[in-house]
Amino acid sequence: AQTVTQSQPEMSVQEAETVTLSCTYDTSENNYYLFWYKQPPSRQMILVIRQEAYKQQNATENRFSVNFQKAAKSFSLKISDSQLGDTAMYFCAFMKQEEYGNKLVFGAGTILRVKS
Amino acid sequence: DTGVSQDPRHKITKRGQNVTFRCDPISEHNRLYWYRQTLGQGPEFLTYFQNEAQLEKSRLLSDRFSAERPKGSFSTLEIQRTEQGDSAMYLCASSLATVANYGYTFGSGTRLTVV
């Protein structure tokens, strides 16, 4: 079974600064996908960024980028130029490559607070 | 595209009562997922449908839980004889099966409180 660990329950960052959220996972699979989801207070969870395990190049989406270290089973999220709207719970998630199911296994989450 | 809708947003019920939640996925999505999120934890998989077929159920889904997706459109999740441990946020998500590995679209959830 796969597990996802987020070791930082809470983080805070000043507006316009950079913050990195950590995530490690455990799997025996070779092909899989990794995700970061953002869940603002009382709002729906939205996809921030996705990484395919077979791609060495780290994914980027505007101010969001990842540091994917497959051998270390590490998948951190870097948020540059933090904005107040980035305040949310962030979840790291793992998805095994499979024809059916495509189930997500989530970590416990990191609460990020962006301060003005 | 109105996104994934869940109803109700909040439900408070007495222990032992039955509750039913509804999820309306994005209309062209043939995959529908239910997850449960307890306080301070990430969501956990409960079950999923492809069209009207329920293809997998987690061990978390005890026999008090039942989910349906008649005609492959909306889905309902029923909990019978609710217990305090059922208090959680119940999340629905949908996707096209062919691109499910790109992640899904989540609804805002139904928060259940059992008193």
Image (tube, helix red, strand yellow):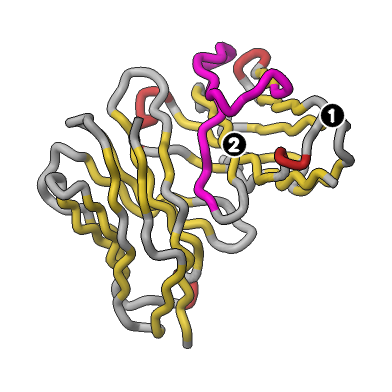
The stretch in magenta equals B41-65
Does B66 sit above or below residue B24?
A: above
Q: Position of residue B20 (x, y in %)?
A: 78, 30
Is disc 2 placed on a helix, strand or loop?
A: strand
Q: Is residue B45 magenta?
A: yes
Residue at 54% over, 62% down: A40
Q: Position of residue B26 (x, y in %)?
A: 56, 33
Q: Position of residue B23 (x, y in %)?
A: 67, 33
Instruction: Identify the residue under disc 1.
Output: B18
Q: Nearer the viewer, residue A95 or B83?
A: B83
In this rendering, position of residue B46 left or right of residue A5: right
The N terminus of chain A sits in image quarter: top left
In this rendering, position of residue A59 left or right of residue A83: left
Residue at 47% over, 31% down: B95
Q: Is residue B20 magenta?
A: no
Q: Position of residue A58 (x, y in %)?
A: 17, 53
Q: Nearer the viewer, residue A68 or A73?
A: A73
Q: Mark 1 or mark 2: name the one nearer the start of the chain.
A: 1
Residue at 34% over, 40% down: A94
Q: Quadrant of residue B68?
A: top right
Instruction: Identify the residue under disc 2.
Output: B92
Disc 1 to disc 2, C-alpha distance:
19 Å
For badge 2, the amino acid type reads Cys
Is disc 1 placed on a helix, strand or loop?
A: loop
Residue at 44% over, 27% down: B96
